[in-house]
Image (cartoon, rainbow, N blue to C red):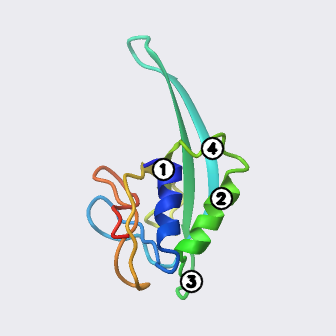
Amino acid sequence: MKLHELVAALQKSLTTFPRFVLPDGNYIPAHAHVTEVGHVVRKFIDCGGMTGREEKALLQTHVGNDRDHRLKSDRFSKILQLGMRVLPSADLDVDVEYDCTPESNTAARPNPVSCARASPNQDSGDLLRDGRSSVLTQPWI
């Protein structure tokens, strides 16, 4: 999913509570915070000598102790708009970084966002999913 598509989905339903869904169908906790919007460029070479380049927008999430925290679509949209100060384009694919073990010292793994959907209440529905990894999901918007 492109960043501009995610922002558009969020703006269609400003009072909903987006949820991140893992590939196995489990949710990232509803009180997860989006703590950072970043621009990532990865240049690489494979074992056959072919070079490549990937460029993405990266959303970093954090699950803290504030279990009453809920991120509404309007606030999430504003965070993404602020992120445009460091992103070269809204046409970038979006990855979500989530470490499922908050007490872990291991690095979080980025996961591609495929589509978005919103829930009218803070405890159900999802907005961010992918068939391969942690992500945002298809819109019910």
**In the image, farthest residue toward the front:** 12
Q: Earlier in the sequence, mark 2 or mark 3?
A: 3
Q: Amino acid at mark 1?
A: Asp
Q: Give yes or no for contact between labels 1 and 4 (Cβ–Cβ under 8 Å).
A: no
Inter-mark Cα distance, 2 to 1: 16 Å
Please give left or right for residue 118 compared with residue 23 in the image: right
Q: Secondary structure at mark 4?
A: strand
Q: CA distance from mark 3 to mark 4?
A: 26 Å
Residue 80 lies, in percent from the top left, at: 61, 59
Q: Earlier in the sequence, mark 3 or mark 1?
A: 3
* Residue 39, disc: 4
One can see residue 98 in this view: no
- Identify residue type, mark 4: His
Residue highlighted by disc 2: 81
Q: Which residue is mark 3?
A: 69
Which callout, 1 or 4, points at the residue further toward the start of the chain?
4
Cα distance between the residues tagged 3 and 1 = 22 Å
- Give the foreground label among 4 and 2: 2
| Above or below, comparing residue 128 to residue 112 in the picture | below
Residue that numbered label 1 is attached to? 95
Q: Mark 2, mark 1: which one is toward the viewer?
A: 2
Dot 3: within a 10 Å radius of its alpha carbon, few (fewer than 14), some, or many (20 or more) residues? Answer: some
* 4 and 2 marks in contact (CB < 8 Å): no
- The amino acid marked with disc number 2 is Gln
Q: Earlier in the sequence, mark 4 or mark 2?
A: 4
- Rate crowding at label 1 as few (under 14), some (14 to 19) or many (20 or more) other CA atoms within 10 Å: many
Residue 89, x across and y down, in percent: 62, 41
Say which quadrant the C terminus sits in.
bottom left
The 10 Å Cα crowd at callout 2, few under 14, some 14 to 19, many 20 or more, is some
